């Protein structure tokens, strides 16, 4: 299953740093997000788009994870010549991440 079946996401950028939130539709799915959506998996999923560290923050009170991605390839939207370098597109890429289909 993909993340988009149990969560939604928002993202944005400031220079070469992108912030991506991942919010469970149902709070019972939050532990599944914590187990399967690690900083390492997000880094691997977005390989080729970012060159730096990925830091994960857990927000259990709202059933969400927040990722701060450093080193956007090309320097971010204000410096790159890429067609769609906006950090807003990172949320869609993350929602295609496959996770095990398990009970919450």
Image (tube, grey):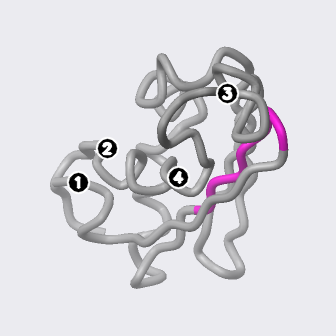
Residue 41 horizontal/vertical position (percent): 46, 30
**In this view, the mark in front (3 or 2):** 3
Which badge, 3 or 1, comes first in the chain's sequence? Answer: 1
Alpha-carbon distance for marks 4 and 1? 15 Å
Q: What's the magenta bit mostly, secondary-structure-wise?
A: strand
Residue 52 magenta: no
In the picture, which quadrant includes the N terminus?
A: bottom left
- Left or right of 97: which side holds 58? right
Is residue 68 or residue 40 the one in the foreground? 68
Checking the image for residue 97, the label placed there is: 2
25 is higher (above) or lower (below) than 35: below
Alpha-carbon distance for marks 2 and 1? 5 Å
Residue 88 horizontal/vertical position (percent): 57, 57
**Residue where numbered disc 3 is placed:** 80
- Left or right of 93: which side holds 19? right
Which badge, 4 or 1, comes first in the chain's sequence? Answer: 1
Is residue 48 or residue 65 the one in the foreground? 48
Alpha-carbon distance for marks 2 and 4? 14 Å
Checking the image for residue 18, the label placed there is: none
Residue 20 magenta: yes
Residue at 39% across, 46% down: 93
Badge 4: few (under 14), some or many (20 or more) residues near its Cα, within 10 Å?
some
**Residue where numbered disc 4 is placed:** 34
């Amino acid at each position: 299953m993909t993340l988009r079946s149990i969560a939604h996401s928002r993202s944005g950028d400031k220079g070469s740093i992108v912030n991506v939130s991942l919010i469970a539709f149902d709070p019972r799915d939050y532990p599944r997000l914590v187990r399967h959506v690690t900083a390492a998996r997000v880094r691997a999923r977005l390989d080729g788009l970012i060159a730096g560290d990925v830091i994960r923050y857990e927000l259990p009170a709202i059933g969400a994870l927040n990722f701060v991605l450093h080193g956007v390839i090309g320097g971010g939207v204000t410096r790159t010549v890429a067609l769609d370098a906006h950090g807003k597109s990172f949320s869609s890429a993350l929602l295609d991440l496959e996770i095990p289909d398990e009970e919450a």
